[in-house]
Amino acid sequence: MNIALADRVRNLPPYLFDRIDKLKAEALRNNVDVIDLSIGDPDIPTPSHVVEALKRAAENPEHHRYPSYRGMASFRAEVSAWYKRRFNVDIDPEAETLSLIGSKEGVGHLPLAFVNPGEVVLCPCPGYPVYSIGTLFAQGEPYFMPLKEENDYFPDFSAIPQDILKRARLMFLNYPNNPTSASTSRDNFVKAIELAHKYDILICHDAAYTETYFDDKRPISFLEVEGAKEVAIELHSLSKTYNMTGWRIGFAVGNRELVQGLGKIKTNLDSGVFQAIQEAAIAALQTPDDQLAYIRNTYQDRRNCMYDGLRSLGLEVKRPEATFYLWAKVPANFNSESFSIHLLGKTGVLATPGNGFGVNGEGYIRFALTNGVDRIKEALERMRQVI
Ligand SMILES: *Cc1c(COP(=O)(O)O)cnc(C)c1O
């Protein structure tokens, strides 16, 4: 029997974290005290009122049956109310919202709904890998828009060739940004909307980090910008905001044809989100702001500690206004991979090589703030010996 992978899987770009993963496993086997600053997965538990809401809802047999495809009416109503409270954006809960099994699922499926084979999808580079992989699964052609420091990590649309823009069907944007930690301005969103109108390009804004911000600098929603709803869908996640990565729930909002097109793919592939989890998500979206401020302050303390520490080691690093990442230049004589291997081998500190997010991430390394201040201090102390 010839069990050959399909071309779309066989032709996937190589998994760049492979080597690092193997080195980490080896370090753990050798009983190295690894300080893992590589993963974008909160170490803080889900708030207890959310866990309690799940427990209560799990006892209700009504929730044991297939959920509705688009999300429960009460969940969609809460999403709409949250958008109004948080961004002052009006979202029709009936036609402009959709539950997702995490926002990754929405990113991955969106090209299947809107991209024909051979059409171009504009993807930020460095960027979350699912934008381009989802494109390839839909037989689309990713075009990588470099995110450069001198442009505050926003794409330079004037650098995209005309023939690419004419063939482009969809563009992914993500602010606050993973992995660069950059926030962006309303003006930049306006430029994106102008480009979208001029070339008939749909926009998907991945808003996973709008609630993980510092110094009271609250990021805006793409949908706050005039005309956004004509061209855009925005994907939100409860994962990072409420420390719920394991729960797998997010949502899409925005242009109704975009939302409904994505829904059409999903009705044919999945059967929605367990309703008890949707009940818990409603409780999460209703979390009082002082509790969220506590989570943000925890990350802010870690950000301050890591930023000051890396600077004192002589590393060039961006001071994030949001996300829980720091994006640092690797020292001279290193590249992304050799520096992360150096750190892991000499100190047991694991950070993510920037080139894993695409060629424009080369020369950078990403530190995640998913360890407490004590561990961050310990990591910095160890690094001081070898940088
Ligand atoms: C974490 C992350 C996601 C995925 O979040 P889920 O809702 O857990 O699927 C999407 N986009 C970016 C940029 C992320 O960092």
Image (cartoon, grey):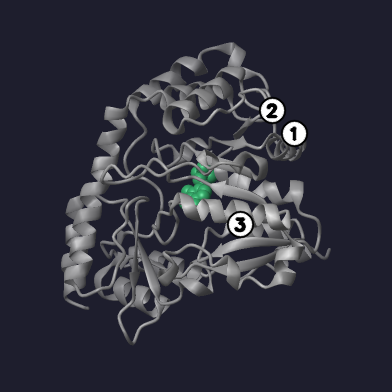
Label 2 and label 1: CA atoms lie apart by 6 Å
Q: Are marks 2 and 1 in contact (CB under 8 Å)?
A: yes
Instruction: Give, as a three-letter code, the residue at label 2.
Output: Tyr
* Residue wearing tag 2: 69
Q: Quadrant of residue 180?
A: bottom left
The answer to whether residue 131 of the structure is visible from this angle is yes
Q: Secondary structure at mark 2?
A: loop
Q: Residue furthest right?
A: 1
Query: Residue 207's x, y, as percent?
Result: 49, 45
Q: Are marks 3 and 2 in contact (CB under 8 Å)?
A: no
Comes first in the chain, label 3 or label 2: 2
| Vertical position of residue 143 compared to residue 52: above or below | below
Instruction: Give, as a three-letter code, the residue at label 1.
Output: Thr
Question: Relative to the observer, which residue lies in front, 110 or 198?
Answer: 198
Query: Residue 367's x, y, as percent?
Result: 33, 61
Checking the image for residue 131, the label placed there is 3
| Vertical position of residue 147 compared to residue 215: above or below | below
| Vertical position of residue 286 compared to residue 201: above or below | above
Residue 241 as seen in the image, left or right of residue 137 = left
Query: Residue 123's x, y, as percent?
Result: 60, 61
**What residue appears at the point 36 percent right and 22 percent down from the top-left corner?**
49
Checking the image for residue 317, the label placed there is none
Q: Pick the quarter of the image with the C terminus.
A: bottom left
**What residue appears at the point 32 percent right and 51 percent down from the top-left corner?**
370
